[in-house]
Amino acid sequence: MGIAKDSIESLKLKAKISDFILTSTTGKIRGNKGMAICPFHGEKTASMSFTDEENLFHCFGCKEGGDIFKYVQLINNIEFQESVEMVADKYSFNLKYTDSQFESNQKSLIQTMKVISDYFKNNIQETISVKPEKYLSSRKIDSSSIGKFNLGFAELDEKIFYDFCTKNSITKQNLKSLGLLSEKENLLFRERILFPITNFRTEVVAFGGRALNDFGPKYLNSAESQIYKKNRTLYFTAGFLKSVKDLDEIIVVEGYFDVLAFNLLGYSNVASPSGTALTQLQLEQLAKYTSNVTLCFDNDEAGVNATIRMLELKNNISKDLNLTSIVLPNHYKDIGEYYEDGKNDVRSLLNGKVDLIDFSIDTIIRKQDTVDKRKIFTEFKKLISTLSPLDQDYAFDKLSVKINTPKDVLIKELRHKKNTKTSDKFTSALKDKNKHIESFKDIFLASLIKNNFQTVLDFQDLFDSSEDMYDTVMKLQSPKSSNLLDGYKNISFTEEQLSEAISRLYIHFFEIKINLLILQLEESNNTDIFAEIENLKKKIENYQNTL
């Protein structure tokens, strides 16, 4: 059940953002405007501006910003609806709720999933098979921990499960809607230990299954459904959010047993992308709760490479992150093995964690297995091609010390090699990115021409964000443009390609406009720009969800 939009807007008129900012950080207000020390990044001087008139805030340091609900959401590590309800409670405001068909379907799916989850939980205790408990015992997970982490078991005989579903009026269509059946409508989980994957409200939305036989992949996740999106959902235990708030840190691991190992070692602030590569959307989700992310991937080549790739992913995240990595002792493949071997000094592992740039440079030097500075620098150039200017400067400082070469010599070497194949490769990648945007433009313009420009008014937002696009469309509509039109008429595309092109163009030009608005904001301190920036951010998010 959601909250009615008009009810949210009415609440915003009654509430004051200063009531929440001045009770959670140090600040001053004069009239309707104020400045405060930003609670979302470390600072000693106030850099966060806020206004009661529009109930908006913006930090000139970390660039975090939004409305009163966004502030309450971030400061309390809660979901949007909870933040609205928290603000309403403060002012004794009665919210109006909606119950759309979509939300009603979601609620029904969540309820059905709970029934199934409870069945699997009971099953691990009551099954006549000793396989699940025997295997878990070998991983140092006892019966108490099985219950604590709500682990389940899907038996080999699927008839038993289907009989249970029949008794509880759960149809095959229900199971398919929940992502528990394959495309051929076969049951996904048979003779598997099940890990419940939850949303941030601790509602079960999917399962991860570890096979106890040689049939199929060792690990298997639920199929995507209305309540489960693989690229944005993570696996964690019930104490996750509280632990993250208390420790102001998230530890990201690879698999399910890694999460449990950390929990059993006393750390619940751990999440896993369920055995697959961490995605940008998953990292964005985690960034809502803290800026401090520590990686503890597998201690093998694949795990090390995945750790280094996080530097590239970091650049695509809207929030600045402090990325570090735990360095496990060489003879342990992962934190699971560390725990199973009876080791428990996690504090010393955390104290020894290193900045991700340091980790990456150390890996480059170790992999080269040579003191040849030229070979090391060749790999180093690939690494810094994805870094921000400040991170590049930090990387040069570190490499300078590690290979005993003056920083200015390293920088000169980089400039000297600007025309090398490595540099050309990086430049080519940037050109390829621009080519994609140009391709999206061509598809979009071809669609306008195909419809005789009848749909131009539908894209006013896009033209407002890009004078270049507007000028191009105006030129194509002029009587002298017949030669230009012919080139676009030969472009073929599907409806799906057109839809993606439009979304990509909106995202591209809105991001450019946001950067320009932020520059204006820093120069003029005009709080009216807040609303425009936040409106564009919401639009970007909407278009990203269509991809």
Image (cartoon, rainbow, N blue to C red):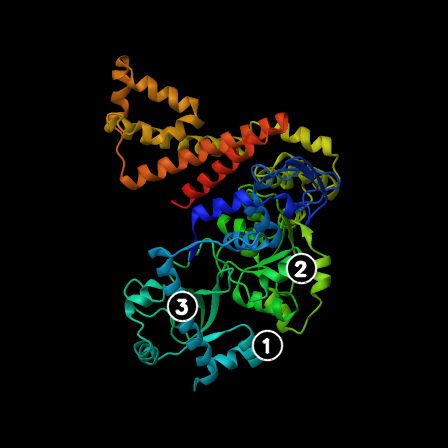
Residue 92 appears left or right of 35 = left
396 or 8, nearer to the observer: 8
| Residue 9 horizontal/vertical position (percent) | 48, 44
Q: Which residue matches tag 3?
A: 111
Quadrant containing the C terminus is top left
Q: Please, what is the three-letter code of the amino acid marked with disc 2?
A: Asp
Q: Is residue 266 visible?
A: yes
Quadrant containing the N terminus is bottom left
Task: Determine which quarter of the picture holds residue 464.
Answer: top left
Q: Secondary structure at mark 3?
A: helix
The relative height of residue 485 versus residue 279 in the rendered view (above or below) is above
Q: CA distance from mark 2 to mark 1?
A: 27 Å
Q: Residues within 10 Å of mark 3 (few under 14, many from 20)?
A: some
| Residue 437 horizontal/vertical position (percent) | 41, 32
Q: Residues within 10 Å of mark 2 (few under 14, many from 20)?
A: few
| Residue 269 horizontal/vertical position (percent) | 61, 61
Q: CA distance from mark 3 to mark 1?
A: 32 Å
Q: Please, what is the three-letter code of the amino acid marked with disc 1?
A: Lys
Q: Which residue matches tag 1?
A: 140
